[in-house]
Image: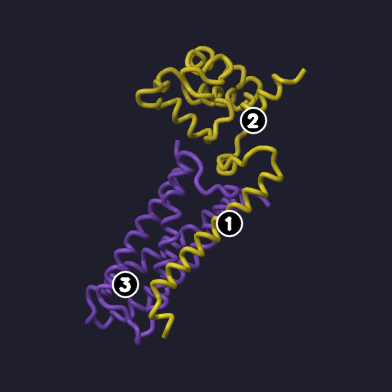
Amino acid sequence: MSPDLFAKLHGASTHLPLVFVASSWAFDTAAFLAPQRNWSSELKNFAYWSMALGALGSVPAVATGLVMSRGEVLGHDTLRMHHLFVWPAFGLTMLLATWRLLSKRHHHAPARWQFAVYLAGGLVATVLMSGAGYWGGELLLES
Amino acid sequence: MILARFRLLISLIVASAALGGTFVFAKALREQARKTSRHVPDAGVWIERRAAGTPDDIAHGRKFYARSCAECHSDDASGDEGPDLRGLPFSNRRVAKIVREGIKGEMPSFRKKYGDKEISSLIAFLRSLPNEDQAVASSSRP
């Protein structure tokens, strides 16, 4: 199969997890800061589904990237910088998404401090994904 | 109920499995690439496919190389004071950037000396050189 196809698929799929994880973090943070508002539970619901889609979207993004680079997990130079952000971002996103999905049930809702830690993790994941996106862009656009 | 109680542990297991699975997949891809190619896969080739330079480009590049690069990188680019330039694992854009901007404390900038066309000829020449393995194989041939 043409490597160009995977380059295009990678470019198309990488934006989904970044957008979904970042928006999930933003929705959850807004709901966390204003728990008494009417819209708080709606935002939490959006955040829940955004995180689920972000985690699911990160799988094709990672898979197409690996096929594109023939299984290179680190590489040199700019590619190395890209991967140094990608792997922690991917692992953290999977961890946060699983925790968030399992915390949906009200019987075992997480304590407020636990949710604060989750939000801090979400911020780190968003920053790492943005870094991965930045270096990915540098790979294609540096001149 | 149990899932919610052990959510942190389960999350750690899922994240580890995702990363582990990814690296196993990556290893399989590398193995497959090794079987279909004599050389170790070079991700840079996939990111930017290198166009072969014309004989004219290569001849011009050879001149620029002899004038400005051979002193540090040796006549056959196998490296001397500077590193081996055969089979560079970087994209052409990256090589051009290094030639233009230099490396602080290690290599001068050639921005004022060479324009884009000259630099692309220089890169065409570097890409035309055999890499270390090919050079050794051809020198050991009777």
Residue B34 drawn above or below residue B84? below
Crowding around mark 3 (Cα neighbors within 10 Å: few <14, some 14 to 19, many 20+) is many
Q: Residue at image x 54%, y 53%?
A: A65
Q: Residue at image x 60%, y 39%?
A: B49
**Residue A74, how many percent across, how many down?**
50, 46
Q: Amino acid at mark 2?
A: Ala
Q: Nearer the viewer, mark 3 or mark 2?
A: 3
Q: Tell me the chain of label 1.
A: B
Which residue is denoted by mark 2 in the rendering? B52
Q: Amino acid at mark 3?
A: Asp
Disc number at residue A28?
Answer: 3
> Is the residue at mark 1 from the same chain as the one at mark 2?
yes
Q: Which comes before the other along the chain, label 1 or label 2?
A: 1
Front-most of B6 and B36? B6
Chain letter matching colour purple: A
Disc number at residue A16?
Answer: none
> Is the residue at mark 3 from the same chain as the one at mark 1?
no
Chain letter matching colour yellow: B
**Residue A90, how many percent across, how many down?**
45, 59
Residue B106 drawn above or below residue A5? above
Which residue is denoted by mark 1 in the rendering? B24
Q: Residue at image x 31%, y 81%?
A: A41
In the displayed structure image, the side of residue A52 where residue B140 appears, left or right: right
Q: Tell me the chain of label 3.
A: A
The answer for how far apart the CA atoms under marks 1 and 2 are is: 34 Å
Residue B103 quadrant:
top left
Q: Nearer the viewer, mark 1 or mark 2?
A: 1
